[in-house]
Image: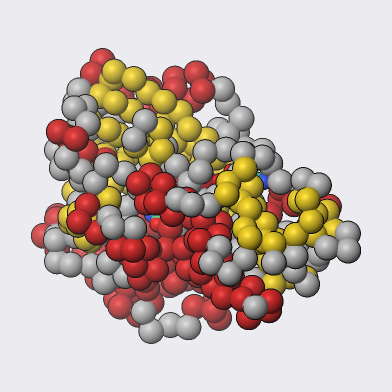
Amino acid sequence: MKIAVVGAGLTGLKAAKELSEYASVVVFEPEDIGGLVASYEGVEKFYHHCFRDDDFLLEEIKRSGLNSKLVWRIAKTGFAANGKIYPLNTPFEILRYPLLTFGEKIRLARFTLKSRKLNYENFDDIGVIEGIRRELGEGLLERFFMPLLRSKFGENAEEVSYAWLLGRVAIRSNRKYSGEEIGYIRHGFQQLVDKMAEGLEIRKERARIRKNAKWEVNGEQFDAVIYTAPLPELGELGEKLGISEIRYQSSVCALVGAEETLTENIYWTNIVDRMSFGAVIEHTNFMLYEDYGIHLIYLASYSTPDGYLFNLSDKEIERLFLSDLKKLGFNTDSIKWMKIFKAKYSGPIYERGYRRKITPYRVADGFYIAGMTSRPNYPERSMNGSVRAGYEVAEQVKKDFL
Ligand SMILES: Cc1cc2nc3c(=O)[nH]c(=O)nc-3n(C[C@H](O)[C@H](O)[C@H](O)COP(=O)(O)OP(=O)(O)OC[C@H]3O[C@@H](n4cnc5c(N)ncnc54)[C@H](O)[C@@H]3O)c2cc1C
């Protein structure tokens, strides 16, 4: 049996690895292997960390012999407002945070507890703005949730469903007293990608798929195709197969090497004021500075493939980012280099009604879809969700063919 896997991100690599024992598998990938988790000179182009409950991902790390390199730390978070940065981790810091009233803080705590018990599927057709305004009021919406939503969805923040927010709060509310513990493979997730790719036949080609008697990829016949690339890339074939139209967001991210840090020990700072980036992620406030010899700071922003920010040149983005870094009080003279990375399709927009569009694994005889639009990647697309989707689609193929 011959199987084509389209895309060598975590989903494609996992599916290919699971099936290569039983079939002849060819992976098609025109870019660097690893997809969104791929690295630039040993550092992820886009900030990445994992969580304690990432069962499929952690199992894969173990199998790849990288367990001893997995580091867990409490990641400090903060909010930047009116040119000041407020750490927001311990109950004491939260109590002292001046942008929310005491009443709002209590309402927020109650909401977090309540969201764990709600069946969030019932809220899929309600917009996030409407839901928060109704449940929590204008103050929490403007001064707490909008900055978070902007850091996650950028220009698309207002289109997200309330179900997404409830699901997200529910999975992320098991925090420790002093903050959330997150994990990282010392020296980078690329090591995992490389291990997963070992022994696979990977062709550096963009896949062009056609349906004949069998499935044809770049002129070669296959019994089955597992498609893990972004859905819009399917073009007409997607329409023919009746695949739901899913809107994607794009990422615009700067990786900065600097001699100074923005904050002393905060990993993730959400930006409350409107700026060209929604979050600052200080990698070397989490991982060892000594591993790099320079402070590594990500400036994260989301746009859409036809959005304003995504279509600016790297130079223009750099200028915007530098000017906003200055407003945060950062000494931009300490910057040694800045590299801009863009991903056109970096995740689905979890807009109203999204849950009905989640793709099944088998969409036609011999044609499978897995990845960021699969069930394990809702309400949060993640490395874990993609490894799991890769595993589950391989199980489906085995059931159908073997
Ligand atoms: C800014 C950012 C930060 C993130 N941070 C985290 C984090 O901290 N923790 C976490 O768990 N997750 C994080 N993620 C999510 C995580 O990176 C993804 O969910 C996961 O890597 C997706 O893997 P995938 O294989 O499903 O998709 P992708 O990685 O998108 O892989 C799809 C592959 O298909 C290829 N492709 C496209 N078109 C074709 C074609 N025609 N033919 C062949 N190949 C094609 C692409 O080049 C790509 O390599 C982050 C994502 C982003 C964008």
Question: In the image, is residue 307 above or below residue 144?
Answer: above
Image coords of residue 80 (percent x, y) = 28, 42
In the displayed image of the protein, which residue is found farthest to the top?
Answer: 333
Residue 100 appearing in the image: no
Given residues 296 and 334, the one toward you in this image is 296
Question: In the image, is residue 356 above or below residue 214?
Answer: below
Image coords of residue 352 (percent x, y) = 62, 66
Image coords of residue 71 (percent x, y) = 20, 54
Q: Residue at x 38, y 84 (%)?
A: 117
Given residues 277 and 59, the one toward you in this image is 59
Residue 45 appearing in the image: yes
Quarter holding the C terminus?
bottom right
Quarter holding the N terminus?
bottom right
Q: Residue at x 14, y 61 (%)?
A: 178
Question: In the image, is residue 133 above or below residue 74?
Answer: below
Question: In the image, is residue 177 above or below residue 257?
Answer: below
Q: Which residue is drawn at 48% across and 46% down?
A: 34
Q: Is residue 54 left or right of residue 77?
A: right
Q: In this view, does 133 lie to the left or right of 236?
A: left
Q: Residue at x 44, y 54 (%)?
A: 196
Q: Please state the total of marks drawn on the protein image.
A: 0
Residue 275: name its quadrant. Answer: top left
Q: In this view, does 348 lie to the left or right of 233?
A: left
Image coords of residue 10 (percent x, y) = 49, 55
Residue 176: name its quadrant. Answer: bottom left
Given residues 47 and 308, the one toward you in this image is 47
